[in-house]
Image: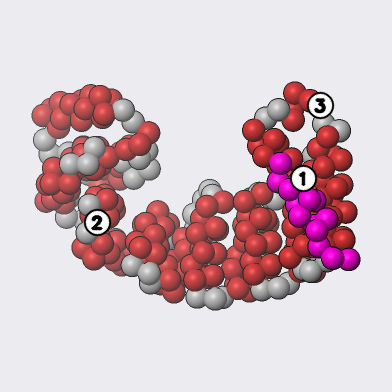
Amino acid sequence: MRSWCISLIAASCLFAPSVASWAHGDIHERIAACTRKIQEQPGNPGLHLQRADLYRQHGERDRALADCARAEKLDPELVAVDFVRGQTLVDAGELQPAKQAFDRLLAAQPRHSQARIARARLFAKLKLYAAAEQDWTAALAHVEDPEPDHFLERAQMQAAQEKWDAAVAGLDEGVRKLGPIVSLESAAIDLELRQGRFDSALARVDRLAAQSVRKESWLARRGDVLERAGKPEAARAAYQSALDALQSSPSDRRRTKSLHDLETGIVAAIERLKKVPR
């Protein structure tokens, strides 16, 4: 019985979308459809667990937990119950009971990456940064398709402990696995700057600029790094290069809000640096 239960849960429950991605009407319809299936197969624990997660998405804590209990009673070895139970309790703000649910699941399945991620985020809410970091590292060792946010969240936990080198190294690991993701590279630059490692930050910016077809954003970032390093003349030259590159772009492209904001920021930086004594 357990094989089809686990298959059903993996497909429709454990990786179900969050409540924000479904209209309430659609959730109601899916709950009703699942309820009809349960009436046809009342002994199917996977269906009860599927409905529990739908109730969780809809914010119905008590019904979600009741369906978790039914699924567990039907199959006491179905450890995935604690994943849905834990998520439900986190959504309800009941963090310690949620932790206990994730603890039980991970004791049975230590390589369950989604449970590791869920517990890491729970630890972050509890400000248990070292424990969160450990769970992130364990999750990233096994998750099949890591996301940039996974590496960013672990780096945040490491930075909260002032483990700057580990945070930068972890972001670089993400870049090696996922490619030159801007959010990862920018976070690494920020960490380098926070430690006053201006040369390292500048080397990253220059490497990214060399790899980019559109260079104006990285040239502006170069100006920012140089300005923070106390080199106003070099910073102004970098900002001017960024402005020149931006103004050589097609006018329709420059009308986008992001590029308009970038241009405004660059011009302000140039004007600010004009007032710095030489």
Q: Nearer the viewer, residue 103 or 157?
A: 157
Q: Is residue 70 above or below residue 165?
A: above
Residue at the disc numbered 3: 250
Residue 116's quadrant in the figure?
Answer: bottom left
Residue 171 is inside the magenta segment: no
Type of residue at label 1? Answer: Val
- Helix, strand or loop for the magenta stretch, by majority: helix
What's the distance in space between the residues labelled 2 and 3, CA to CA? 50 Å
> How many numbered discs?
3
Image point (74%, 40%), residue name = 263
Label 2 vs label 1, nearer the camera:
1
Q: Secondary structure at mark 2?
A: loop
Type of residue at label 2? Answer: Gly
Label 2 vs label 3, nearer the camera:
3
Q: Is residue 251 above or below residue 131?
A: above
- Sequence-earlier tag: 1 or 3: 3
